[in-house]
Image (spheres, rainbow, N blue to C red):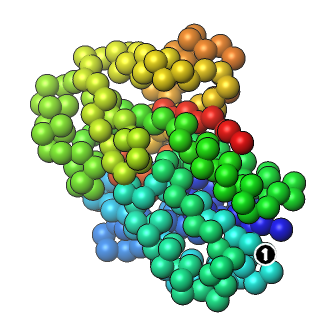
């Protein structure tokens, strides 16, 4: 049997994950010097309330100790695959490798860099869990993960660039362009998953979404992909994006989720992401 482990970047809380046989180690949000395990001790709405009162949140990865405990428990009798957020966007992958070397059964633990985050990472985890429950071995699951992760394409439309600037995810120049000129700048995850790059500069939200759809079509993305719209309590924008995708790809499978506290802290209030991934065996 193969056990699947990941983190709250998948938008699964520990409680939700337990119900489907998934092991989740939470990421942390830091507000006013206090650490909160996301989904357990703070949710996105509560974080936004703190931000409205002037709080400046930061985030941190799961502790190596928590990872070691999880590996020791799961790998005692089974192989383990830990599917982490993209290396470069977080230190979670690197700390997971350190935890693997420090655990009791390192040969049974496979740490996989998803090269993605949020919706597509959730898709990879769900498919891996399905394969594990069907009795597939570690090698087969990792092969699926490797093939599928290369199909991911992810975009972000921020509403407030200060949050991305603080985290070093965009330059001050890009942030100033968006803020000063009141333009809508769309960001795209780099192919290696290590950073966010400027994708397009637009006068309107509609223009930003159209630029995303144009890129998706150019990349050959179609209804065989799984689409994910995630937002930091910006349901109106999420619904607008969904409608525009459906008008182009009426048979598309689309899930909408509220962003986790950690990614709300990084992307800022009101940000919205559109992502797609194809599961390939």
Residue furthest to the top in view is 247
Query: Which residue appears at 30% of the width and 17% of the height?
Result: 204
Image-based side of 229 in relation to 269, left or right: right
Residue at the right extreme of this rendering: 134
Nearest the eye: 238 or 210: 210
Q: Position of residue 277 (x, y in %)?
A: 58, 36
Q: Quadrant of the N terminus?
A: bottom right
Answer with the quarter of the image where residue 105 lies: bottom right
Quadrant of the image containing the C terminus? top right
Residue under circle 1?
Answer: 78
Secondary structure beneath dot 1 equals: loop
Q: Is residue 231 at least partly visible in the picture?
A: yes
Q: For this view, does 245 lie left or right of residue 211?
A: right
Q: Is residue 150 above or below residue 266?
A: above
Residue placed most toward the observer, 54 or 105:
105
> How many callouts does the rendering have?
1
On screen, residue 131 above or below 178: below
- Return the x and y of residue 264 as percentages of the image width and height: 41, 49
Q: Residue at x 19, y 25 (%)?
A: 182
For residue 84, what is the image quadrant?
A: bottom right
Give the residue drawn at x 27%, y 56%: 167
The residue at the point 41 percent across, 73 percent down is 35
The answer to which image quadrant residue 119 occupies is top right
Whether residue 119 is situated above or below residue 83 in the rendered picture: above
Q: Nearer the viewer, residue 107 or 62?
A: 107
Around disc 1, counting alpha carbons within 10 Å, would you say few (fewer than 14), some (14 to 19), or many (20 or more)? some
**Image spot of residue 195 (x, y percent):** 33, 48
């Amino acid at each position: 049997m193969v056990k699947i482990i990941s983190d709250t970047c998948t938008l699964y809380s520990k409680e939700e994950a337990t119900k489907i046989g998934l092991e989740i180690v939470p990421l942390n949000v830091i507000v006013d010097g206090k650490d909160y395990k996301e989904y357990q001790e703070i949710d996105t709405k509560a974080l936004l309330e703190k931000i409205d009162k002037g709080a400046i949140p930061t985030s941190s990865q799961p502790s190596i100790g928590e990872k070691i405990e999880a590996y020791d428990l799961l790998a005692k009798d089974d192989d383990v695959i830990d599917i982490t957020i993209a290396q470069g966007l977080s230190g979670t992958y690197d700390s997971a490798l350190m935890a693997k070397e420090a655990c009791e059964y390192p040969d049974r633990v496979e740490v996989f860099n998803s090269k993605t985050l949020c919706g597509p990472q959730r898709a990879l985890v769900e498919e891996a869990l399905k394969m594990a429950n069907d009795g597939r071995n570690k090698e087969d699951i990792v092969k699926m993960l490797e093939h599928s992760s290369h199909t991911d394409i992810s975009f972000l439309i921020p509403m407030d660039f200060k949050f991305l600037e603080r985290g070093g995810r965009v330059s001050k120049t890009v942030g100033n362009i968006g803020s000063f000129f009141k333009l809508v700048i769309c960001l795209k995850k780099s192919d290696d998953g290590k950073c966010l790059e400027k994708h397009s500069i637009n006068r309107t939200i509609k223009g930003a979404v159209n630029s995303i759809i144009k890129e998706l079509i150019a990349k050959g993305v179609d209804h065989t992909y799984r689409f994910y719209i995630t937002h930091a309590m910006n349901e109106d924008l999420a619904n607008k994006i969904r409608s525009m995708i459906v008008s182009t790809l009426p048979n598309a499978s689309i899930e909408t989720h509220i962003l986790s506290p950690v990614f709300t802290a990084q992307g800022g209030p009101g940000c919205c992401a559109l992502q797609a991934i194809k599961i390939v065996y």
